[in-house]
Image (tube, rainbow, N blue to C red):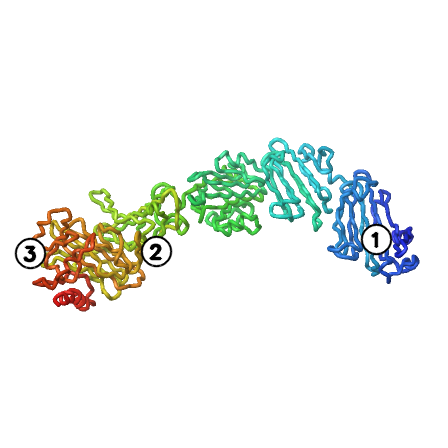
Amino acid sequence: MHLIYLFLLSIFVSKADGNSRKTIFQCDQHFDESQPEGVIEFPSLPKQLALSHGVNNSKPEQQYNLQCVYTFVAGSRQRVRLEFDHFLLSGSSENCDIEYVDIYSEVESVDEDILSSALGGRYCGTVAPHVRISLRRVMKLVLHSRSTNHEDNHGFRAKYSFIPEDKFIAGEPVGGKKCSFIIDSSDRKIGTLYSPTYPGTYPHNMHCSYLMKAGRGERIRLFFTDFDIFFGGEHCPYDSVTIFDGPTPASPIIRKVCGLQQRMEVYSMGNSLLIHFNTTHPAKSDPRGFIMDYEFSTRFVNIDKLLNKQRGVTHIRGTECDVRVESNRETFHTISSPNYPEVYPANTTCTYIIHGLQGEQNLEKVILTFDSIAVLSFDTSPATAPPSADIDDIACPSAWVGIAIGEGNMKAVMSSTDDSTFDVTLCERIPPNSPLLGPYISEGPRMVMQFGSTETRDDNISPIGFKATIEFKTDFGVTGESLGTSNECKFRFTSSTGFFNSPRYPANYPLDTNCTYYIVGQPGKEILLHFEQFALSGNTDNNCNDYLDVYDVFVKNGKEELRRKERYCADTFPGPSVSAFGSHEMRVVFTSGSSGTANGFKALFEIRTARKEDVPRGEAHIRRGAYRCGSVINSTSEKPNGLIISPNYPVKYNKDVHCDWQINVKEGYQVLLKMEAIDVEGEMTSNGASCQKAVIRVDGGPRSEYCGTKREFFEAYLSPSNSVRISFLTAPDKVNGLKGFNLSWTEVKNLSGKDENVCKSDSLYLCTYSKLCIDAKLRCNGLDNCGYGVQDDTDEQHCQNYSPRTFYTAKFMATSSSATVALTILIIVMLVLPAILCAH
C-alpha cells in the first residue's frame, strides 16, 4: 500500500501551450539491496486525483501523459528477477500506442540512458511479459500511459527479487564476456548450465560460448531438461544452439537446434565439446533459453573399442554408442555389445543402424548372424532363471537385443519411442547352434538392431554380451534358388509353375548386369514360357543395348549343349515359347549395357509333360485346355504347293495352342512362303513386334516373330534349304482369339544369276522377273507363286490361252475337325474362281 500512497503523492508538473493542456505525473521509483524483494503495482488513477488537477476526461484534447520509470539495482554478484502475476493495460499486442510497459534487462549501469539501451520488449493489453532476469545488476521498467481507463482491475502487479548470480557463472569466464566460459572436468564432474537469463526471456543479439574440457579417457554427456529457443525455420537461421564435437568451430557439428526440444541428449566422441548460443532480433514470443545438465565420465562406452577400426563401421555423432554399419559392396562386418567380451555397462542403449547399398546400380539385403549371445536379464540362480526351453518366448526386463526388420518397427526404434517393438527380442545365454542365433535377413536394404541394459548381471562365464556378423548380399529381387557367389545373378527354378524377373523388377534394372535363369524340368517334361511384362532399354543406334537370350539345353554324354532360340531386344515383346523337342531345360540370359535402363521383364513358366513327337501327325487335345496340332508336309510332283492354316480359321483360335508344321521339298529346291491373310492379336511395326498373346514363328525367317493384322509386314520368304518349320503358339492364359492366319507355301528353285535352261521344260515355268522356277501346274491357279524380292505375277498372266488348266488344292492343311468342311469350301473357291475368270 505504501507504493500506492507514493503514487498518489507523486509530483505533477503542468504545461500549457495555449490551446491544449497536458498533465504529466512524475512517478519514478528506485529499488536497491535495501529492499531485496517486493511488489510493484500500477492501479487505475483515482477520479478525485484527476479532478483535483482539473483534468476533464470528457475532453479528448485534455489527457494524462504518465511516464513511470522503475529502476532495480541488485547487489554485487546478484541479478534482478521480475515476475508479473497481473497485467491489464489498454491496447493490444498489435497496437501499444496508448499504454504500454518497456523492459530493459541488459542495462550496464544505473546511470545508463535507456534510450541507448537495448529494449528487451514492449507489452500492453492482456499479454503479460514472461519472467525477466537481468543480464547484469540493473533492470529498468518504464510505464507509458495516456489512458483514461478507470476500471477496478486495470493496471499491473509484479514481484521483484534479487537472486544470486552464481548459477549463471558456468565456469572460467573467457575474454571478459558475460556468457563465455571454459568448463573443465578438473573443477567438477557434474553440473548444470543455464542460458544467460534462464528462465527469463533471453536477450537478443547475443553470442555465448561454452568450451567443455574433459580429462583423459573421459567423454562428455549433455542432457537438456528444458529447451526453448525461437524457431525461425528448418535450419535455424536466427536463434540457435550449435554443438561442436571438438574444441573449435572447425570441429564437426553434432547438432544445430532451435524451437522446443524435449529431453535432448548429446555425447561427445572425444574429450571436448564446444557450445555456441546465438540470438538475433527480438522474437514475438518470449523464449526462455535452456537448462542443461552435464557430466564428465569414463563410464561412457569406449567408441574406439566398439568400432574396432572397421571400414564402414562408424559412430553416429552425438550419441553414446549408436553405430552405423554401411556396405562397401558385398562386405562382411562384425558388431558387438560395449566392452565385449567383458561385462557390458548398465543403463546403456546402443542402436546399430545397418545399411546395404541402395541406388540405381545396387540393391543389397542384410544378413545378421550371431556368433554368441549372453545378455543376462534374470538372476542366474536356479530359482529365478527362466527355463531354457522357453528362451525364445521370455520377456527381457533388464537387458535385451532387439532386431527390427519390418519398416514400422525400424521407424519406431529410430524415433527412440518408449514403445519401440522388435520383430525379434533375444536375451539370456543362447546355446551354440541354436536357430535363435540366426541368420536374420532384412526385407530390404536396411535393418536396425538395438542393445539395451538397465542393469548388469554376470554368470561368471565368458563371454558376456553379444557378437554378431553382418553380411551384405546383393538382392536382385528374384525368386528361385540362388547359385554361385552372393553377387552373381544366377537362379534355378524347378517347381512346376513359377515366374522370374529382371533384377529389382518392377523398379529399373541396374546397368552392366548379367543374369542367368535356369528353368529345369525332369526328362519327359517340356517348358512353356510366356511374358507378362517386357520393357528393355534401347535407342535408335542400338536397339539391342540390353537383350534377353533364350536357349534350349540338351545334354549329350554328360555335356551341355545350348541352342539359342531367339534374342529379344527393346523393340520386341516376346510371344509364348516352348522348349525344343527332347529338351527339358531352358536357360534365359539377361544382359544390360552401360547406359540406359527400364522396368525390365517378368516371365511365367510351366513345366509339363512333353509332347510325344517333334511335329505332330494331326491334331489333338493333349490336356485340359491345351491344343496340339500340325503335320509334316512333303512336296511331290503332284503336290508342289499348299496352305498352312491356323486352328479354326477363320473362326477364333483358342488359348494354349501349340502347332508345328514341317515343310520338306525336293533336294535343290527351296520353300517360298507368302502370307495370304493374318489376323493374330498383337502388333508389328517396321522394326519390331509385340506378340505377347499369340505368335507365328518361321525358322530362319527375316523376323523372329509375326502377329498383328498387317500382311505387308510378312514379306515373301525363301527358305535357305529345302526344309522350313512354322510354329503357332498362344498363351496359356486368356487370349482375345482373333481369326488366325492363312499362309501359302510353294516349292521353287531360285535361278537368279544361274543357268535358266534348267527350267526350260513343259513341266516347269520360269518366272519372268524373280527368276523362280516353279511347277507348270501352278500357272493360273489364282495364287501369286512368282513374287519374291520383286513384283512378279507373270504366272497369272495370259491364262485364257493356257491349256490344260491344272489347279492344285493343298491337302496338307492344319485345321481343327470343327472347321474342315468350311475350310475345304473356302480353299476350292479361292483356287477355282480365278481360273474360271481367266477362261472368260
Percent position (x, y) of residue 825? 17, 68
Above or below residue 812? Residue 477 is: above
Q: Secondary structure at mark 3?
A: loop
Residue labelled with disc 1: 41
In the rendered view, does 230 fall on the left or right side of 550?
Answer: right
Which residue sits furthest right? 52
- What residue type is disc 1 on? Glu
Instruction: Give the label, 2 or 1, closer to the camera.
Output: 2
Circle 2 is placed at which residue position? 532
**Res 683 visible:** yes
Image coords of residue 716 (percent x, y):
21, 54
Q: Amino acid at mark 3?
A: Asp
Q: Which element is circle 1 on? A: strand
Please say if 186 is above or below 379.
above
Does residue 438 appear in this view? no
The secondary structure type at the circle numbered 2 is strand
